[in-house]
Image (tube, coloured by chain):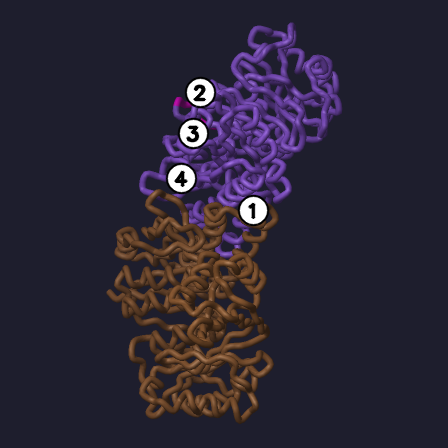
Chain colours: A brown, B purple
Amino acid sequence: MSLTVMKFGGTSVAAVEKIRNAAKKVIKKSLEGEDVVVVVSAMGKTTDHLARLAGELTERPNTREMDMLLATGEQVTSALMAMALQTMGQPAVSLTGWQAGITTEAFHGNAKIKDIDTRLIQQHLNSGHVVIVAGFQGITDKGEITTLGRGGSDTSAVALASACGASLCEIYTDVTGVFTTDPRYVEEACKLKEISYDEMLEMAYLGAGVLHPRAVEYAKNSQLPLTVRASFSDEEGTFIKEGAAMEKGKSVRGIAFEKNVTKITLLGLPNEIFTLSNVFNILAENKLNVDVIIQNALDESRTNLSFTIENGSLGETLDILDRNKARLQYDDLNIETNLAKVSIVGSGMVSNPGVAAKMFDTLTQHNIKVKMVSTSEIKVSTIIHEKDLPVSLKTLHCAFDLAEKEALTMKPSLG
Amino acid sequence: MSLTVMKFGGTSVAAVEKIRNAAKKVIKKSLEGEDVVVVVSAMGKTTDHLARLAGELTERPNTREMDMLLATGEQVTSALMAMALQTMGQPAVSLTGWQAGITTEAFHGNAKIKDIDTRLIQQHLNSGHVVIVAGFQGITDKGEITTLGRGGSDTSAVALASACGASLCEIYTDVTGVFTTDPRYVEEACKLKEISYDEMLEMAYLGAGVLHPRAVEYAKNSQLPLTVRASFSDEEGTFIKEGAAMEKGKSVRGIAFEKNVTKITLLGLPNEIFTLSNVFNILAENKLNVDVIIQNALDESRTNLSFTIENGSLGETLDILDRNKARLQYDDLNIETNLAKVSIVGSGMVSNPGVAAKMFDTLTQHNIKVKMVSTSEIKVSTIIHEKDLPVSLKTLHCAFDLAEKEALTMKPSLG
């Protein structure tokens, strides 16, 4: 029998009534003759509530104890989901992460899955049960409860699907799929019918929380097909798989963006072979995420280095740079806040050299100054001022014909 | 090093501030040079809240899934307690029931503890940690999470204390100890300094929820000393141990009672050897608790049988009796509701035949009609009308000199 993993996110199980709706989708799938493993997140704001309790006790809670605390959220949902299915006549059994055989590395708060022993899941499936697994959690070899960090339940779902040999992993969430860009900024934004893993990775920040990049990478590695779809309707979602079909002549699939970007420039660094690694090792040791990086040598001996960070980590970053000024040997430092990153994404652009030029042209025509550029094989990113974000999204969406293209593949929306 | 187990009930950990207070008591104990294992209940109304969520889904939730659901409550408290201790500089580690090595029988919702493997607890104690164990829960041999039913966290505490070789188990709760009777009914009620296990078993219903009889039995079997004391003050509580000191000439230790009692009388049953077992087997099969039982043969062939139940189970009991009327062969049935049970308790009364007579005398003098009597070696129970309860408690408390006796041993109350 073919197996589907269905993952329901926090907003899709935020109340008993929503759990019941999700259970109906599970039963429908089961009646189609599929084996079903369900992965659930904590209900709505549960995780925030638990973290707030910890926050009342300490600013820096012990990560082991945070895992003990937070892992309860998904366990609650899994038990309620099992009850919901049972009352509808569907045999079901809930499992915690450790009961489901999910072992992780011994890194609390952000553990990586090491292995999944699917025997118990298979036993329950074989005896006609839907198996509900508490997402976001696992256990170390020593029996310590761990959580998987951001996007943890997505990762649980994809990892379980892969380990159990599922034919499909469905991510149910509060949007109907992946869009060409955020419809809140561009009315003409369309839901994509298909998208490749790599494109999805680059688009992952569209509609925050739709699907975590880590889960996409996991799915890509096992070539597991994913769908992102709505828990509140029967509308078809976006299908994510290798080599998703490409409309002829369209090299851009969508427009991703991030707000709250800050650019830091270190001036007059020594132009030495170790300079770059020095700077970014120091930041990495302090768990500070750096995004776009540009280096520009001034001459043989000195170089400037710019990079972007989240606005929120500016204080900490400046602290660390200041403390290490002697070691890094920079002369001075510039800061520019309230920036945004806008990226065009599409696996077709690798064979189409005019795409980047068209992006810059479009922005220039609307007097939008590009402050940094960075490119990958399937993405061109520009850093602009945040106030220019709405116009740049609209004009790029239009320039790359994204509305027209997707109209051909859209389903009527029920949401 | 000597080990103390400290158990904090739901009201003692109902909010972060209360958890912090409990943590202070733990640290004080630890600074006295004790190893400490802490057992915690779920915070305040957490269990009720979780049960209500299940109740929104189904009237009869699957007991396995209820255990999965409810066990999270104690896990949350244990993690928060660990954090509270850590922020105060005390190394601490929380363990779920299964991590603490508590295995139970495979009976969901009301599992009995089979065994405790204390190795992990010992390891943590040896490395200077306070170990916090989530109460009320364990795991079966097959890895299924179970809960221990009513008084489960008390039982966890006593069982852990016994398994770890603790010298004392302290039950922290929202009262200052065990009283001669309920102070809400009798102003002169005094806190008992000491009480024996058997007396405590009979008194357990005083101040509902102070300490579950099951935990007292467990403690008695392992001869483990217990104290019941307040989480909100430093006042000494009541010490429970074998052969607690007895004041000279005082044979009654306290007055216990229960409300909401219903008496059922089956009239004209066959006076056969199997009659009693028939009736009570049928009720037991349906999990109905019967308390006082009185049989009175009418003649050689017919007998009347009276027994008491909780008011709340009257409907179900009548149902079952009616369905089995042919099998039981009774002629008719009487019901008397809104009764109360009043019991005098004391291990001294076994050698003092006048105690029961004094009780009946006292009640008669106040025109209180005794509807049923039942006796054990350390208790005389009477069933009276519930409206007579306040007067009977007051007059019995006075008749047996309970106020005077305990005044000698009382500490000033801070609560």
**Which residue appears at 48% of the width and 72% of the height?**
A305
Residue at label 4?
B99
Residue B237 vertical placement versus A233 (above, below) = above
User: Which amino acid does the dot numbered 2 rest on?
Assistant: Ser
The answer to whether A56 appears left or right of B122 in the picture is right
- Reading the chain from its start, which is encountered first: label 1 or label 3? 1
Q: Is there any visible trace of residue B367 in the rendered image?
A: no
The answer to whether A204 appears left or right of A169 in the picture is right
> x, y percentage for residue A243?
29, 79
Name the mark nearer the viewer: 1 or 3: 3
Name the mark nearer the viewer: 4 or 3: 3
Mark 4–mark 1 Cα distance, whole angstroms, equals 22 Å
Q: Quadrant of residue A385?
A: bottom right
Mark 2–mark 4 Cα distance, whole angstroms, equals 23 Å
Whether callout 4 and callout 3 share a subunit is answered yes
Mark 1–mark 3 Cα distance, whole angstroms, equals 33 Å
> x, y percentage for residue B372?
60, 22
Q: Are marks 3 and 2 in contact (CB under 8 Å)?
A: no
Residue at label 1?
B46
Dot 1 crowding, Cα within 10 Å, few <14, some 14–19, many 20+: some
> x, y percentage for residue B71?
47, 44
Q: Chain of mark 4?
A: B
Q: What segment carries the magenta color?
A: B267-273
Mark 1–mark 2 Cα distance, whole angstroms, equals 31 Å
Q: Are marks 2 and 4 in contact (CB under 8 Å)?
A: no
- Reading the chain from its start, which is encountered first: label 3 or label 2? 3
> Is label 3 in a helix, a strand or a loop?
helix
Q: Is there any visible trace of residue A7 in the rendered image?
A: yes
- Reading the chain from its start, which is encountered first: label 4 or label 3? 4
Name the mark nearer the viewer: 3 or 2: 3
Q: Residue B113 versus residue A404: which sits nearer the camera?
A: A404
Residue at label 3?
B126
